[in-house]
Image: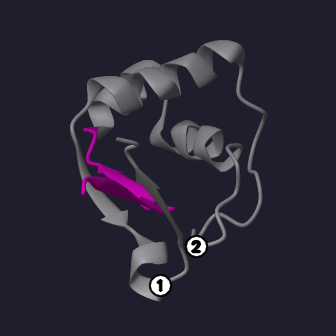
């Protein structure tokens, strides 16, 4: 008999970038301004940014931030926490003959 087991997981993915300061300064004017732009993103419960700093980012700065996350390499760490905790749903399906 052929059947399928499906596990429904949730994963937290962390992307770590190491972008040269010169590239950040060229795009945002300063490293401090880049930190301000980052601080206006959704605040993370695991992060060290607890409140927004400086002026709210312009649309151009927002676009530049997302371009950086696309154009630069990163290290990725996935935490399949539902797998680790056992807190996920399982469904089964089988083929009718």
Q: Using residue 55 as the reference point, say whether residue 77 is left or right of it.
A: left
Q: Using residue 6 as the reference point, say whether residue 18 is left or right of it.
A: left
Q: Which residue is mark 1?
A: 86
Query: Which residue appears at 59% of the width and 44% of the height?
Result: 38
**Residue 53 part of the magenta-drawn span:** no
User: Is residue 38 positioned above or below 77 on the image?
Assistant: above
Quarter of the view holding residue 33: top right
Q: Quadrant of the C terminus?
A: top left
User: Is residue 86 positioned above or below 77 on the image?
Assistant: below
Query: Which residue appears at 60% of the width and 21% of the height?
Result: 61
Q: Which residue is mark 2?
A: 46
Query: Which residue appears at 56% of the width and 46% of the height?
Result: 35
User: Is residue 16 positioned above or below 84 on the image?
Assistant: above
| Image location of residue 11, percent across then percent down | 46, 61
Query: Which residue appears at 48% of the width and 86% of the height?
Result: 85
Q: Which residues are magenta?
A: 1-20
């Amino acid at each position: 008999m052929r059947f399928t087991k499906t596990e429904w997981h949730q994963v937290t993915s962390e992307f770590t970038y190491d972008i040269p300061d010169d590239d950040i300064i060229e795009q945002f004017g300063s490293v401090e301004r880049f930190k301000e732009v980052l601080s206006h993103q959704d605040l993370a419960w695991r992060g060290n940014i607890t409140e927004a700093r400086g002026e709210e980012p312009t649309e151009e700065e927002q676009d530049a931030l997302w371009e950086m996350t696309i154009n630069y390499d990163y290290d990725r760490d996935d935490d399949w926490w539902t797998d680790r905790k056992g807190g996920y749903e399982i469904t089964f399906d089988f083929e009718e003959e």
